[in-house]
Amino acid sequence: MGCGWLGFPLARHFCEKGWTVKGSTTGEDKVNRLKEAGIIPYLIQLNPLYKGNSMEAFLDSELLIINIPPSLRKQTENYHVEQMEGFMKHIRSSRVRKVIYISSTSVYPDLNREVLEEDVTSIEQAESKTLFQAEEIFRTEKSLEVVIVRCAGLAGYDRNLVKHFAGKKDLLFGNAPVNLIHRDDVIGIVYELIEKGMWNRTYNISAPEHPLRKDLYSLLAVRYGYEPPQYVDSDKSAFKIISIKKLQKDLNYTFKFTDPREFLYK
């Protein structure tokens, strides 16, 4: 559900592994792209509720991966929660019994230390109340086996984050460690979670290394031909370091990119 920047290559990966894959998109112009990749396309929009006649066929499946991040353009704070609540009603009446919900480490506040999955287990602890509420819709659904995947900042290929900072001056948070994950590793981890049956859990996903923001973006600017950003030297940055100890213990995944300084970009 949601074949965008992450969802499309994720769906394509499953196709390459021999799975039958259905994929949703909100734009008619993307339907042919899905078909060409071997993905069975469905045009589905949650605005915030679904109106149409494709949902029953789309959810005629054993496993559902939900990759619909909250939209910053929507006006109401509860829009994404309303989307997921409405979507859950369709899921309950389908044959789907296993769900992976792609969430984000933005659910964590800056605690100036390493953060674990157990640091946010209630809405009062969450930085993003919307994300936590959406997670809970799936985590508390007794008819489903669910994995919540909290992804660090997504990067790789055409998503080189240095573009947003190049040439800027007096930037803050330069001394904060970054929490990033390469798209290839998100795909690899999600696939292994499914293959190894790691259900009814919540996992952080981040690259193991966390260089300082000023160091990373200065290096990437030079490497890719951008003007380096300049950070305030005296800045005492609030930060968090996303722990993946739980993931490493349970999955023992071998990262393709352990360090954001070595991510593959176009």
Image (cartoon, helix red, strand yellow):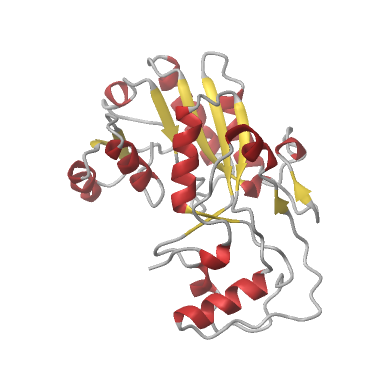
Residue 81 rendering spot, x and y as whole percentages: 55, 35
Q: In which quarter of the image is residue 240?
A: bottom right
* Residue sitting at x 57%, y 33%: 148
* Residue sitting at x 72%, y 54%: 241
* Residue sitting at x 66%, y 66%: 211
Q: 248 or 79, which is in the foreground?
A: 248
**Total number of numbered discs in the rendering:** 0
Residue 86 seen:
no
Quick check: 160 left or right of 209?
Answer: left
* Residue sitting at x 75%, y 59%: 239
Quadrant for the C terminus, please. Answer: bottom left
Residue 156 seen:
yes
Residue 89 rendering spot, x and y as whole percentages: 45, 20
Q: Quadrant of residue 165?
A: bottom right
Compared with residue 200, is residue 233 higher up or lower down, i.e. above or below?
Answer: below
Residue 166 rendering spot, x and y as whole percentages: 53, 80
Q: 114 or 92, which is in the foreground?
A: 114
Residue 208 rendering spot, x and y as whole percentages: 63, 53
Quadrant for the N terminus, please. Answer: top left
Q: Quadrant of residue 22?
A: top left
Quick check: 184 left or right of 118?
Answer: left
